[in-house]
Image (cartoon, rainbow, N blue to C red):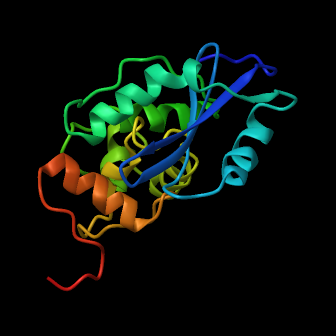
């Protein structure tokens, strides 16, 4: 992860089937994946304090490798992401985000599981805060974190998106939260 303050940021909109996600990257790697169907302003508001003074330029070609991996994931053909990331966080956030990447595809862990995994068992609330600050939805799989009781809990992309991603990974049909079957 790059620690330079000023980097050129490039962005694109992944529009695939009914997925619409803004994405941004620097020359060093992927920096942001937005929430489903959220406006460009969500991405700007997220990136500006983390990459102060960095210009934001649309460059679909530069982000195509990242878009390609995400589409493969959304089609169920990819389980791991291989391209570099360039995101900013505190040492604690970086530790939590690394732990998220260790949750196996198709499985879920609780916030307590993450706290135990990083050997900070009393830091469950701080773990939740760090997860909420994750800039890379999907590729840093915070959607795999659920409540200790097994219920879906908060997710920057919304519970609908979280449920959809978990169903994709578990090979089950997608059912919207609160939908009657």
In which quadrant of the rendered image does the N terminus lie? Answer: top right
Residue for point 46% across, 36% down: 97
Q: How many marks?
A: 0
x, y (%) of residue 181? 14, 82
| Quarter residue 139 falls in | top left
Question: Which residue is the extreme one toward the right?
Answer: 53
Residue shown at 64% from the left, 34% from the top: 89
Question: What residue do we see at 37% from left, 66% from top?
Answer: 160
Compared to residue 119, the image places residue 161 above or below, namely: below
Q: Is residue 109 visible?
A: no
Of the pair 59 and 163, the residue shown nearer to us: 59
**In the displayed image of the protein, which residue is found farthest to the bottom?**
180
In the foreground, 122 or 108: 108
Position of 26 with respect to 148 (left or right) is right
The one of 80 and 99 positioned closer to us in this rendering = 80
Residue 124 lies left or right of residue 12; in this view the side is left
């Amino acid at each position: 992860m790059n620690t330079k303050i000023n980097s050129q940021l490039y962005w694109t909109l992944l529009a695939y089937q009914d997925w619409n996600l803004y994405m941004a990257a620097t020359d060093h790697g992927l920096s942001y994946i937005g929430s489903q169907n959220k406006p460009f302003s969500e991405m700007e508001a997220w990136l500006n304090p983390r990459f102060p003074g960095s210009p934001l330029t649309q460059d679909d070609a530069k982000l195509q490798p990242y878009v390609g991996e995400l589409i493969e994931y959304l089609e169920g053909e990819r389980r791991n992401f291989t391209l570099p990331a360039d995101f900013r966080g505190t040492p604690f956030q970086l530790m939590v985000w690394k732990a998220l990447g260790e949750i196996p595809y198709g499985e879920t862990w609780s916030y307590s599981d993450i706290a135990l995994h990083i050997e900070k068992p009393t830091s469950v609330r701080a773990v939740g805060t760090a997860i909420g600050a994750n800039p890379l939805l999907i590729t840093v799989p915070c959607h795999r974190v659920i409540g200790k009781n097994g219920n879906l809990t908060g997710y920057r992309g919304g519970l609908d998106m979280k449920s959809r991603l978990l169903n994709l990974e578990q090979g089950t049909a997608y059912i919207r939260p609160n939908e009657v079957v």
